[in-house]
Image (cartoon, helix red, strand yellow):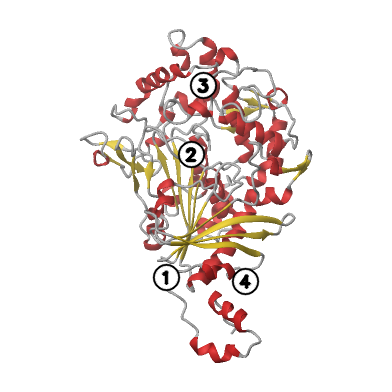
Amino acid sequence: MGRRRRTVWERILLLAFAGTGGLAALHCAWPAPPSTASNCSVALLSGFGVDAVSIASATDEAALPPNPVFCRVQGSIVTRGGAGDGLAEFVLKLPAAWNHRYLFFGCGGNCGSVDSVSANAADVAAALSLGYATVNTDAGHEQDPSTPDPTWILLAPGVPNEPAIADFYYRAVHQVTVATKTLAQDYYSGKIEYAYFDGCSTGGRQSLMEGERYPEDYDGLIAGDPVMDLDTQRAATIKQAKAFLPPAAYIPYPLIPAIDAAVDANCDALDGTVDGLIQNPARCSFDPHSLVPATLSQAQADGLERYLAEVVDSAGRPVAPGMIVGDYATSGFEGQAEVAAPAADPTGAQPWGGIGRGPSAWLIGDAGIRYYVEYDPAYDVNNDWPEDGNLIATAAVRLLKRRQGAGDSDDPAKLQTYLQQGRKLILYHGFSDAQVSPYRSLWFYRALAQQEHGYASLQDHARLFMVPGMGHCQGGSGPNSFDTLTALDQWVTDGVAPEALRAVNATTGRTMPLCKFPEEAKYVGGPVDAAGSWVCPATDRRLLETGPDGALAGAARE
C-alpha cells in the first residue's frame, strides 16, 4: 500500500519540530483534526505539498447573515499544459460547519478578478449557510482597471497572450478545481462527497466546458444563460448593436413601453391566459412594421426586424439565432442594444464617442473582435468588419472559429461522456435575455435530445428550464429567483430529478413553477400570480411550437 498523505496539521508540526528530536516525543500528543473549522490561520501553510499553489492570505470571517463563520483563503496556482505557464488567482471559502460538498462559482464577462462571480444569485446567497466549501477564480488574468478593453489578451499587437487565453477558455477552472479540492480536504481532514459547478453567462460556458473537457471534475453542473459559443456570439452582439446604429433606426426610450404593449397584445394570450407574461416568445407573430407609422418609423421598424432576425453567413447558413420579442422595458434591452441617446458619430470607429461608450452589445462585440479575433486594438470594427445587418461573410465566420473556437462549449457530442457517467446537468435561460439569445440554449438542448434519442432519455441526466420574462441571468418582469443548487443536490444524491423549479419575483411577489423543457406552464385557475395556479403537464410539448417570430429568429434550428 502507498503511504498515507499527511494532513495539513501533520505537516505544520513536521515543519515545527523537524530535526529537533521532539517530533517522536510529541507524536502521541498530536491534536485531532477538527470536525468543524474554527481558526483558519493554519491554512496559510495548506499550499505546502499541493503542486504550484501559493497561499497569500487566510482570514477568519465573522458570521454576517446569511453567511456563517468561515475561513477565507486567497491564493494562486501556476497553470500548466497546452500553452505556456500562467497564473490563476482563487478565493476558497471554508464554512465552520462543512457538509462535505464542494461548489465552484463561475465568473462573468471576461472575468479578470476574484471579485467577479456570475452564478445563480439564490445559490450564491445560500451556499455557505448550507455548508458548502465554495471557490471562484479570476480565470487566469487580471483586468486592467484603467480601461474597459481586455488588454490582457495581447502581449503586443498581433501577439496573443496564449497562456492567459487558454486559462480563460478552459485551463484555469480545471486546475483551480483540482488544487482547491485538495486544500479543502486537507483543511477539514475529510473527503469531498459531492462536487458541483454553478455558473451563469460566462460562468454557464465554464460549467459546460467542465462537463465537456473534464467530466470527472464535477458530479453536477448548473449552467445559466450560457455564452457557449464565444465565436458566433461576437457576430450576434455586433448585429444587435448595429441594428439601431443608423440615426433613423434609433428607438428613443419613451417608445419602448408602446412596443412592449403591442407585443403583449399579440402574444400574451397564446399560453391560455392574459397575465402579463409570455411563456413562449417563439410562438409570437408580432410584426414591427405593424407599428408604422403610428408608433415607429419605417427605419425603426426595419432596425427592430434586423434585431429579431438570425445571423446567417454568405451562403445563408445559420450562424447565431435572433433575439426575442417583448419585455424590452424590464429585461435589459435598454443598455444592451441601445443607450439613452443615439450615436453621435454613426460612421466613426467608436460611434458613441470613445472606447467603453455605447450599448453593452457594442462594447462586448467591438472589444472582442479587436482583441480576440483581429489581434489589433486599433481595428475599426464599425467600418471594416464584414458584417452587414444579419449577414456576415463566411470568411469572417471561419476566422471567428479559428481564433475563439477553443473557448466554445457548445458541442453535444463532447458532453456525451459526462452524461453517460450518470452525472447531472441543470440548464436554465431567461426567455427575455437581451444579451444572449435564449434560442441558443434551445438549439443546444434540442441537439442534445437528438443525440440522446429523445427528451425522455435526455431528462434522466440533463434538464432545461426556460424562465419567462427574465433577462440575462436576472431581472425582468417574471419570477426570476429560484434555487437550482438544492434541486441539483437532491438529484445527484437522492435521484430525485426536478420536475419544476419554484420561482419568485421578489419585487412583485409573483410565484410560478418553471417547467422542464419542452413543457409549458399551464394555468388551472386561481390567482394568476400564484404558483399553485399553474401546473407543468408531463406530456406537454408546447415549448416546441414556433410561430413567425420564432421562425425569423431561427428558434427551431437544431
Q: Position of residue 462 (x, y in %)?
A: 45, 51
- Mark linked to residue 48: 4
What whole-number distance in Å separates the C-alpha atoms at marks 2 and 4?
45 Å
Q: Nearer the viewer, residue 407 or 539?
A: 407
Q: Position of residue 119 (x, y in %)?
A: 48, 47
Vertical placement of 27 versus 460: above or below? below
- Res. 5 in view: no
Q: Which residue is tagged 1?
A: 36
Q: Which residue is tagged 2?
A: 442
What whole-number distance in Å separates the C-alpha atoms at marks 1 and 2?
43 Å
For badge 3, the amino acid type reads Ala
What whole-number distance in Å separates the C-alpha atoms at marks 4 and 3?
53 Å
Vertical placement of 189 versus 275: above or below? below
Q: Which residue is found at the position 62% from the left and 69% from the top?
A: 50
- Res. 74 in view: yes
Q: Which residue is found at the position 59% from the left and 14% from the top?
A: 247
Q: Earlier in the sequence, mark 2 or mark 4?
A: 4
- Mark linked to residue 340: 3
For badge 2, the amino acid type reads Leu
Q: Is 378 left, or right, of 512 in this rendering?
A: right
Q: Which residue is found at the position 55% from the left and 79% from the top?
A: 10
